Amino acid sequence: MNMQLNRRTLLAGAGALTVSVVLPGQQARAAVFGAEKRPPLKPENLASYVSIRADGGAVCYWGKMDMGQGTDLGCAQMVAEELDLPIERVDILAGDTGTSVNQGGASGSTGIQMGGVALASAAAEARHQLVQMGSKHLGIPADQLRTENGTVISKTDPSKKVTYGDLIGGRFFDTQLEWNKQIGNGLFVKGAGQRKPVADYKVIGASPARRDVAPKVTGSVAFSVDYKIPGMVHARVIRPPVAGATPIAVDEASVKNIPGVRIVREQMFLAVVAPREYDAIKAARQLKVTWSESKPNFPGNAKVYDHIRSAPVVEKGADKDVGDVDAAFRNAARIVEATYEWPFQSHASMGPACATIELKDGEATLWTGSQKPHYTAEGVANMMGLPLDKVRGIWVPGPGCYGRNDAGDAAADAALVAKITGKSVRLQYMRADATGWDAKGPASVHRARAAIDKDGAIIGFEFHSRGFSRLDVNSNESQKHDNLAGQMTGVPLKPQHVFNTPEESYGFPAKRKSWETVAPLLDRASPLRSSHLRDPLGPQLHFASESFIDEAAFATNQDPVALRLKTLKEPRDVAVVKAAAEKAGWQPRTAARKQVTGDIARGQGIAYSQRNGTRVAVVAEVEVNLKTGKVWGRKFTVAHDCGVIINPKQLTLTIEGNVCQGLSRALHEEVKFNDTAVTSVDWETYPILDMTEAPETVDVVLINMPDIAPSGAGESSMRPLAAAVANAIYDATGVRLRQAPFTPERLKAGLV
């Protein structure tokens, strides 16, 4: 596919014709605009979020993107609701710095929570403005008008009406909004127009069909690998065989037989370019490089937890204590405690990242699969030394991105190559570059303790985490020091040391939650640098805390569900635990049941968590082969409360995806490394859940809270998944696995 695009396609003709470049699979509709130019892209301008086409439909400019969950469809529903338009008349232009303001990218499950809410608020203001225009046009007071199907209509005389297209079609709103920027999460916008009351919803709560599925199935959608620029070169990076090594000498003669090859080198950074892609691949394989000695002294994945325990503390933090924790443990009749371990994990996206940069007339256009194209474009500008307004970033579908995978690094690498060569560049990683060198989810160790009095009541709870920071490199890719290319060219480092505590509402009389971080294993250009991986820190924190709640329940002769229901203090938390347990047919128990038939043991486990306002409880039902040690997550029941539900079907599918990816991380995923390098570089060395291991059933109980704003669903149901599986394994076998992933080897070792 030869997608020859120019960065001026959309904006240069704004005075005459605007072409809606929409999300993959959506039909692009052209709207003839007058001589009026679109107001500047500023958060306070209504035109930055919504405009009305000549046919009366709406075009919305979304500064986020969708990672395959249909979030764009949910945003379109919210806009359609507020504008009183059919959903098919609303188009969403997503993740393009040339058409939208920066709403923080796809981050923290905020696509609907903040991006959708911002668009809905803008649409409500647009409806208000349309009614005011209609009032002047019809000569009827605004309070005597209503809107329906893209038309402003008299409440008393339906024959008196005017369409949105007749009022402003093809022109732009000049209204200004109030706005507040939430760093990294998006924009809150507010105008005079009020959003609809819940009772009037017609589109929100429905499940219209996705627009992007059919084009993906038929192969008609262009992905990040499909964009090509006339005259561009193909690039491949060359990573050191030992982490931290630098190229001392490069034998250019070793690739002289490959036509058009050029070696690109700056300090630690090394790449090759060629007019033909396969020639670049051959050159990268064939180039002879002498590397410096490097001793990163990685402890290896088998010893990483000992390293975390013994390494000096860099930063620490804590929640405010509840009650007198020290006294609770000092006066306890007995203390129960346990330690849990979570490995480095890779994004392991379905394909390596690809970035294409076009250079033309001193400006650059980037096509990227990054989930934060505004920040990625800023990173390209910084890497190339260009003003930000001379770089346009355009999100296009890539191989998947949940957090900080390799897409941002590919863009920064492409920018450096383009700067050095002066050429338009298409840079694609190989599999080992992607899995081996992406920013990893951090490894960590967690210790939990419970103080129990003489009557068997839990009077104190303490939870402490220690691990690598979740922001050794930032997730937004905008600064040189957060990208491999920048670090390899010697920019000063600015790591952030951040961890977290579990989100829950357990009301123990005394409670303490705290964390500590340790320094990265290699401070610069490390294949083990850590950053955001889907639900940053959530799975590891709640694997430990929710496993321990089960252990505490059994230690005090209580059923795990009963203990949670007795101890949780927030009604919404109680509701999801009850709903999941009832739907799954939970059978109370105070010890592992060990239900065995032949070589198969069956068990059921529960876990719960909060995530930024969303509440989730998961009941896992597993089958364990006692001979092989293999675990099958046969059935999952998920109760989910994320406030008002925009699209029930898409929410259900999102939860199912969370279950499968969370199960993969619980059973398989662990980055292996030795004392010099990461050795998990492909599907064999970093296996993930395959189709034969997928759950037989995922039952989803959606708890709609129409009067509560949406709080996000892209990550929430992954958070308690590993703990539910671990608790189910214990119920099946009596083996308490406190180290993830739950591999056959670890399970069989526990059975001995």
Image (cartoon, rainbow, N blue to C red):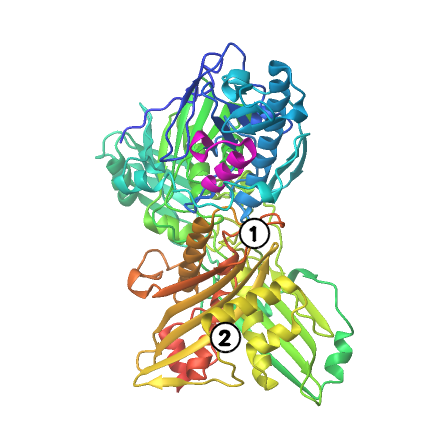
> At which x and y percent is residue 566?
65, 75
442, above or below 602, in the image: above
Estimate how packed mark 1 is, as few (under 14), some (14 to 19) or many (20 or more) residues with alpha carbons within 10 Å.
many
> At which x and y percent is residue 203?
50, 40
Precedes in sequence: disc 1 or disc 2: 1
Mark 2 secondary-structure assignment: loop
Front-lying residue, 619 or 647: 647
Question: Which quadrant holds the C terminus?
Answer: bottom left
The circle drawn on residue 738 is: 2
> At which x and y percent is residue 396?
40, 36
Quadrant housing residue 154? top right
What's the magenta region?
A: 72-92
- At label 2, which amino acid type do we have? Arg
92, above or below 724, in the image: above
> At which x and y percent is residue 544?
55, 70
The circle drawn on residue 472 is: 1
- At label 1, which amino acid type do we have? Asp
User: Is most of the magenta stretch helix, strand or loop?
Assistant: helix
Choose mark 1 or mark 2, whichever is in front: 2
Quadrant housing residue 573? bottom right
Question: Which quadrant holds the N terminus?
Answer: top left
305, above or below 365, in the image: below
Q: Is residue 744 left or right of residue 541?
A: left
Front-lying residue, 117 or 351: 117
